[in-house]
Amino acid sequence: MHRSSLVAAALSATLGACVAGGAPPPAPLVTLPATTVPAASSSGPPRAATSATPGTPALRKATLVSLGDLDDVLQAPATLGPMEEAHATARASGTVSTLGTQVGGRVHKGDVLVTITTDPPGARQVDVTAPRDGVVLECKVHVGDHVAASSVLARTADLSTILVTVAVPEARAGAVKVGDPLALRIPAFPARVYMARLTRVAPVVGADHVLPVMATMDNPDRALLPGMSGTAAVTLATKTHVTMVPREAIVDQGGHPAVFVLEDMHVHARAVDLGLDGGRLVEIVSGVVAGNLVVTPAEGLVDGDVFVGAP
């Protein structure tokens, strides 16, 4: 079958489905057999869309501009901390005689953390105990240290839940709200994605022009530890019935975004206005409509090139 007939048949079937069933599925592909088209002289016919290696055709695909829902996702750094700390304090001044636990140790309320021999007169042994169940985050003293009354000797926390703090850039501060879903990735566990929702938004932007927002995350296996860091993807909003194309279909043409539309086996540059950036997909506000074919990847194409499809 002639190549133009292949394109016509593929377009007819795909666009017919759009009319009958509403919005098409995301970015269906029209793939044509690979063809080597000889490069033309400046006075000859249009050149083939080839790769950077002379004589090797570029592997490109014609992708339908689609309609669908697009998430506005903010990627921002995140740090982990305890939900709430408890401090074990000295009830009297004296010298540390024994330590009942180590950093990282699991303790229950009432367990002895530190024993102090109080200062004379009337020296006696005083136990400093864990104020609640949890894990010892820090022990601030060593045997032989002298401590003052009311000084903090140890910090503990329940790590069954973790506080995630996300650093939102000031420019996006107005978009975040309590309840926004969050997906957290931690380098220590690259195969896992932790899900939560924002529970708190700080009332002020810091001097570093960052708005802290927080989420509470279940941590039943205690794998997540205070001090870990990662990347949070916060979904700020979802736009419906959006015209969108793959990111690799967009190129810069003289300082303005453009795509290459496929018509009659040739590609033609068309300026577009961009909207929401959804990461892999980008909203097109104007310039193309659903059902148009754009060529990907667009980098290296020139207006009027002959289309060379991927095998």
Image: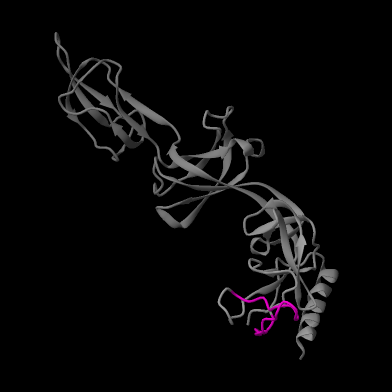
- Front one among 309 and 139: 309
Membership of 25 in magenta stretch: no
Q: Residue at x 27, y 20 (%)?
A: 90
Q: Is residue 37 above or below residue 119?
A: below
Quadrant of residue 154 within the rendered picture? top left
Name, please, the residue furthest toward the right.
19
Numbered label tally: 0
Tell me residue 224's x, y (percent): 41, 46
Left of 176 or right of it: where is 102? left
Location of the N terminus (image quadrant): bottom right
Quadrant of residue 57 within the rendered picture? bottom right
Q: Residue at x 68, y 61 (%)?
A: 250
Tell me residue 114's x, y (percent): 23, 27
- Front one among 103 and 202: 202
Quadrant of residue 294 within the rendered picture? bottom right
Tell me residue 196's x, y (percent): 55, 46
Q: Is residue 26 visible?
A: yes
Name, please, the residue furthest toward the front.
43
Tell me residue 87's x, y (percent): 35, 26
Q: Is residue 152 above or below residue 306?
A: above
Name, please, the residue furthest toward the bottom.
1
Q: Report the span colored magenta.
A: 32-51
Location of the C terminus (image quadrant): bottom right
Q: Residue at x 44, y 41 (%)?
A: 80
Q: Is residue 178 visible?
A: no
Q: Is the stretch drawn in magenta largely helix, strand or loop? A: loop
Q: Is residue 200 above or below residue 188?
A: above
- Front one among 284 and 167: 284
Q: How is the image coloured?
A: one colour
